[in-house]
């Protein structure tokens, strides 16, 4: 009788595969790892987008400085609507909607590649603050 019981136990232990409990434990571990990793990855994606917006704003600002310098050299008034068009052409961005100068600050609105309208405020020392992303 004892031999029969041992033979049955040995036959069961020789089966290949995973038990339901083992599979559930692995799935729980994977879920925990995903819960930790996903927010970190999303944070990096958002930081990268923000940095891209800042770099786009700085590219537009370089065009603004160049065109202002040309207008000053030629004793012409600065046409910011024309600069917006020129900035779009030179930076290969989607439409630069508007450029407004208020003292030493520029407010720039443009459409980014991800379909958002970005509003940024720049100062002469190239400080960029993204104020709106719609």
Image (cartoon, rainbow, N blue to C red):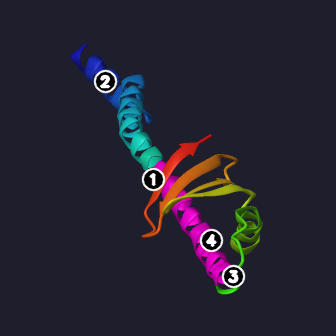
- Horizontal side, residue 104 vs residue 21: left or right: right
Which residue is located at x 34 percent, y 30 percent? Answer: 13
Q: Nearer the viewer, residue 82 or 13?
A: 82
Question: Would you say residue 68 sits in the magenta stretch?
Answer: yes
Report how far apart the C-alphas of labels 4 and 2 lie in the structure. 82 Å
Along the line of sight, the residue nearer the viewer: 72 or 1: 72
Judge by depth and name the residue closer to the eye, 76 or 19.
76
The answer to whether the residues at label 4 and label 3 have Cβ atoms under 8 Å apart is no
The C terminus, quarter of image:
top right
- Which residue lies under the disc numbered 4? 64
| N-terminal label among 4 and 2 | 2
Magenta highlight range: 44-72
- Mark 1 element type: helix
Q: Nearer the viewer, residue 30 or 52?
A: 52
Q: CA distance from mark 2 to mark 3?
A: 98 Å
Q: Which mark is residue 9?
A: 2
Magenta-highlighted stretch: main secondary structure?
helix
Mark 1 vs mark 4, foreground winner is 4
Q: Are marks 4 and 2 in contact (CB under 8 Å)?
A: no
* Numbered disc in front, either 4 or 3: 3
Mark 4 or mark 3, earlier in chain: 4
Q: x and y percent of residue 86 in the render?
A: 75, 71
Task: Report whether 3 appears left or right of 40.
Answer: left
Image coordinates of residue 108 in percent, x first then y, are: 61, 56
Q: Secondary structure at mark 2?
A: helix
Secondary structure state at the residue bearing disc 3: loop
């Amino acid at each position: 009788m004892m031999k029969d019981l041992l033979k049955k136990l040995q036959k069961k232990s020789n089966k290949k595969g995973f038990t339901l409990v083992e599979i559930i434990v692995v799935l729980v571990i994977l879920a925990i790892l995903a819960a930790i990793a996903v927010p970190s990855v999303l944070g990096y994606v958002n930081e990268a987008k923000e940095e891209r917006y800042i770099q786009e704003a700085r590219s537009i600002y370089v065009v603004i400085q160049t065109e202002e310098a040309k207008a000053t050299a030629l004793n012409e008034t600065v046409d910011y609507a024309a600069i917006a068009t020129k900035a779009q052409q030179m930076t290969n961005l989607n439409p630069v909607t508007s450029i407004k100068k208020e003292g030493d600050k520029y407010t720039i609105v443009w459409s980014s590649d991800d379909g958002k309208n970005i509003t940024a405020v720049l100062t002469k020392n190239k400080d960029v603050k993204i104020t709106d992303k719609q």
